[in-house]
Amino acid sequence: MNPSEENFLNNLLSAFRFAALPAGTNSFRAEVKAFLQSSFEPMPADIRARSWMGFNAAFSKKLAARGWVGVTLPAQYGGASLDAFSRFVLVEELLAAGAPVSAHWIADRQSGPQILKFGTEAQRQFYLPKICAAEAFFCIGMSEPNAGSDLASVGTRASRCEGGWRLNGHKIWTTNAQHCHYMIALVRSSGESQDRQKGLSQFIVDLALPGVTVRPIRDLTGDAHFSEVFFDNVLLADDALIGNEGSGWAQVNAELAFERSGPERVYSSIVLLEHWITCLRSTPAVSAHAATIGRFATHLATLRNMSIAVTAKLVNGESPLVEAALVKDIGTEFEQSIPAVIGAAIAMDPDALVDAELYRAVAYVSQIAPTYSLRGGTREILRGMIARGLGLR
C-alpha cells in the first residue's frame, strides 16, 4: 500500500466511529413493534415495498396521535423531545414493516428540524405543532431542470417587492408536491447564477398560493410521487424567509445531513429482500442462495452501523456531511443490488413456480430502483463531496 492509499484508508476509517444504539431504545422499539402489529393492516409485499414513498395521511395521523411525528422536536412545539437514536429505531421499524410513511416523512425528517434550528420563534410556533399533528406536510424544493444535483446553480429567484418577495422559477423531482401543504425552497435572492453559493436563501412556500402550479411526473411503476413545481410571480410575505437572507447554502447543507444518512438510505428494498427469504425458506433452493443471503446480511449490518454512527454525530450537534454522503452512496448501491440479484436468482430456474406476490414485488422494486441514485443527490455529486472531504481533490 503506497502512502497515498494508506492516508485515504486512515481518513475513511476515522470518519466513522461506530456507535451502538443506546440500551434505552430497546423498550421504545418494543412499543413501536406492538403498535404496528395492532394498527397496521397486513398488505402484500409489492404494496409494502413502497413504504417511504407510500402516501397515507390517515396512517401519519395515527402515528402523530402516539407522538411519533416530529419525535425529535421539543415538547413545547408538540414534539416528543426524543433524540435522533429514538427516531432511528422508529424509522427502522416502520420501513421494515413497509408502513406508508411518505405523507409526514420530509416534515418529520428535515423540514421540522430545519425550522427549529434556523426559523424565527413565530415560524416555530406556527409550523411545528402542525407538523407534529400530521396536519402540515412538507416537500423539498432543491433540484431544478438543467441543474440536477448541482444545487449551487439554481435559477429560481425571489426578488424583493412591496409586501415581501416575488418568486419565479421551476423545481423538479419534488417528492409528493401534489399532496403537500408547504415547500422549503432553495432559491436565489441576490446576485447571478455564476455567483454559485452566494446569494442563496431558503423560503417556506405555501403551495396553495396563487401562481403555484404542480404537475406530477408518472414513473415506470405507474406511480407519481415526483412532481414539477412552477412559480409564476408568487407573492411571499417577509416571514416566509428562513434564517438570514443569503445563508441558504449553509442551511441546506445542514439539512442534507438529515436527508442522506437515515435508515431510508439502506432499507428501501428491504421488504423485497425479506419476502424473497420467506419464500425460499419453504423450498430446497434456500441452500443454493445461502451465500447471497449472507452477503446481503453482512452489507446491511455494516451500512446500519455506519448510519448509526452518523446519527451519533447528529445527536452531538455535528453536521456530518461527508459521512452522510458516504452512507447514501454505498447504501444506494446496496438497495439497487437487491432487485437485480433477486431477479437474476429467479431467472436461474425458469421452470420453477414463482410466488405471485414476490414476482410483483421484484417488478416494482426493479422499476423504481433507478431513482434511488437520483433522490438525495446523484452518486457523481456525492463522490465528489466525499473526495473533497477526504482531501483527495
Image: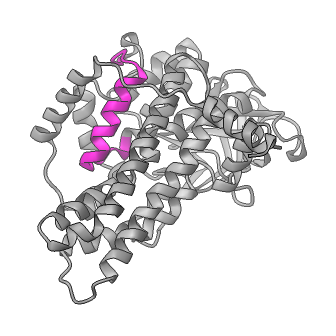
Can residue 166 be seen here? The reply is yes
Q: Residue furthest top?
A: 76
Magenta region, main secondary structure: helix
> In the figure, residue 378 lies in which quadrant?
bottom right
Q: Is residue 83 above or below residue 327?
A: above
Seen at 42% across and 19% down, the residue is 73
Seen at 38% across and 21% down, the residue is 129
Q: Is residue 51 left or right of residue 2?
A: left
Query: In terms of depth relative to the viewer, which is nearer, 301 or 112?
Result: 301
Q: How is the image coloured?
A: one colour
Residue 219 horizontal/vertical position (percent)? 47, 69
Seen at 44% across and 31% down, the residue is 308
Q: Is residue 387 above or below residue 25?
A: below
Q: Is residue 267 left or right of residue 237?
A: left
Query: In terms of depth relative to the viewer, which is nearer, 45 or 210?
Result: 45
Q: Residue furthest bottom?
A: 351
Total labels drawn: 0
> In the figure, residue 3 lies in which quadrant?
top right
Residue 12 horizontal/vertical position (percent)? 65, 37
Residue 318 horizontal/vertical position (percent)? 60, 20
Query: In terms of depth relative to the viewer, which is nearer, 63 or 206?
Result: 63
Q: Is residue 7 left or right of residue 334?
A: right
Magenta residues, start to end: 78-103
Q: Is residue 61 magenta?
A: no
Can residue 269 be seen here? The reply is no
Q: Is residue 90 magenta?
A: yes
Q: Residue furthest front?
A: 1
Query: In terms of depth relative to the viewer, which is nearer, 380 or 180?
Result: 380
Q: Is residue 42 left or right of residue 71?
A: left
Residue 123 horizontal/vertical position (percent)? 53, 20
Which quarter of the rendered picture does the C terminus lie within? Answer: top right
